[in-house]
Amino acid sequence: MPSQELLDAIEAATQAEKITPTAATHIREWLTEPKYADYADQVAEHIRDQKWQVLDDAFWTIIPFGTGGRRGKMYPIGSNAINDRTIGESAQGLADYVKDTLGADAELSCAIARDTRHRSPEFARLCAEIMVAAGFKVYFLDGYRSTPELSFCVRYKNCSCGIMVTASHNPPSDNAVKVYWSSGAQVLPPHDKGIIDRVMNTQEIKRANFDEALAAGKIVYCQEEVDRAFIDAVMLQATPGPRDLKVLYSPLHGVGATCVVPALERDGFKEVEVFGPQSTPDGDFPNVPGHVSNPENPEIFDALIGHAMNTGADLCLATDPDCDRIGLAAPLTLDAGSDWRTLTGNQICGLLSDYICETRKLTPDKFQVTTLVTTRLVERIGISYGIKTIGDLLVGFKWIAQAIDAGGAENFLYGTEESHGYMAGQHVRDKDGAVASMLACELAAKLKAQGKTLHEKLDDLFWQHGVHAERTISVMMPGSDGMERMKEVMAQFRTAPPEKLDGLAVVQRRDYMQNITTKKDGTVEPLPQPTGDLVILDLEIDGNYVACRPSGTEPKIKFYMFAYTPAEMLHDLEEAKAELDARLNTFEEDLRKYAGV
């Protein structure tokens, strides 16, 4: 038992508001409960050193399962940190829930993979030891591999579940586990709540010895077999056509070279250069601006574009550290010396939607899937091809995966979301950087043969479907204070939204938490599913709206802004684009002022 001096110090710090009451509760638990015995000395040392801010950050809450699993900053102790205990609880809770759900007689198995982050190898081995101790056979992808390959492995090996150790595009300080069900999709209700219940009630974490389990065949290395099968599956989405394209590719210090390069080579692209400064697997992401390998950030491409212009490359392609998302940059025209520009996630959504619809055999049963905060250009493209678009989904590819299977996977064409996630085919149930890279390169090569670039093709789509302009801004709100501030901002949007944005009246408010639509005159109507922490404000001009939601994987709140000019109102395309860009600027100014961010 800890000394009374330590307990008194916790109480005094709470009274002095140096730590929150919830942090104090969790700190006491880690000091006193047997299940945390291995960490009690470290907790005590922090108390004696009066590291109250560190303790509050590490203990003020318990890391939840969000849209991408359990993710956060690594620290050796803490309920709100990624460490051996919280990772171990996640694996133990998953094992206990799967066993209870499938029954005692079920043949249990789990696929496990990891990225290039710090401690990912250790966390992957820890998860494997826990799953084996719980009676699971583990299919282990030794070495770093992509998240979509883990999703594929779950399906390919008919596993009961899967674990991916990755924090995707988060800073180097972070890590995480993504938990997958037997479908190869991230865990959905009711399983997510069932797993977290087990996680929260985990007492003892039981581990086998990794090397002994490997020797006994309870852990099976299968990376070479799964690598081949995965690329074979990606190739099923390939389309014959031009391949004269010089590609500059960056894995951004992540895993992407294990699958993107083989996929492009198999698809006939012979000029693929991996960008040297960002090619090495490194959890510090040393040669990436800000050390955050997020292909959503245009500055990621500055060095790539400079190198591409010097070497005559036609396309810059980058994938995030676990290779489930892509980013692109391309010249505005094929003229020598043309300026280059990155493409937003929404723009890539539309380009790939049109390419897939154009190159596939379509019937009215075919469908594509997207989310409520993704460009409606995807929906309008679908209408033009006579296919259905399922678009009333919350953020997170697990909801897209659910819609695929609910709608009939045999008729599924394409799934996409604005944060640079794209999927085609039957091989995975998550966004896939390998297949998206291949499709993007096929489209760019086809356009090059026609004398066009991706930007010029996007202009063609705007002429046909109207100009769509979107912008997303993220405001970081870390720690317990940040969580309270996020709740305040969301409550503000629900109860007292702005009356106008850029002079356009807010005509209705869609609240997906309460599932109601509130009209400008106060009339309230029911709003169908889904249910989640999302508010959308529709403006008086159709197609112009904003959305607000807290991130499910990071301590930040996100604002999504949409502006639109219908095709029939277009006269000068560049003028229309400039007008919408100015409108988005004012939307952003008005939102920041309104929300105090």
Image (cartoon, rainbow, N blue to C red):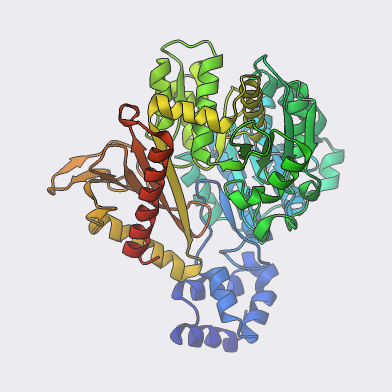
The picture places residue 316, in percent across and down from the top left corner, at: 68, 38
The quadrant where residue 228 appears: top right
Q: Measured along the vertical axis of the image, is residue 58 above or below residue 277?
A: below
The picture places residue 230, in percent across and down from the top left corner, at: 71, 26
Q: Which residue is at a point 75% across and 58% down the rendered structure image?
A: 286
Quadrant for the C terminus in the image: bottom left
The picture places residue 110, in percent across and down from the top left corner, at: 68, 37
State whether residue 519 appears in this view.
yes
Quadrant for the N terminus in the image: bottom right
Q: Which residue is at a point 67% across and 32% down the rendered structure image?
A: 434
Q: In this orientation, which residue lies closer to the viewer: 483 or 309?
A: 309
The picture places residue 279, in percent across and down from the top left corner, at: 79, 46
State whether residue 401 appears in this view.
no
The quadrant where residue 215 appears: top right
Q: Which residue is at a point 30% across and 31% down the rendered structure image?
A: 569
Left or right: where does residue 597 sit relative to residue 39?
Answer: left
Q: Measured along the vertical axis of the image, is residue 502 above or below residue 412?
A: below
Q: Measured along the vertical axis of the image, is residue 531 above or below residue 71?
A: above
Left or right: where does residue 470 sit relative to residue 537?
Answer: right
Q: How many marks?
A: 0
Q: Which residue is at a point 48% across and 30% down the rendered structure image?
A: 459
Q: Measured along the vertical axis of the image, is residue 159 above or below residue 546?
A: above
Q: In this orientation, which residue lies closer to the viewer: 527 or 575?
A: 575
Q: In this orientation, which residue lies closer to the viewer: 324 or 64?
A: 324
User: Residue reaching furthest right?
Assistant: 215
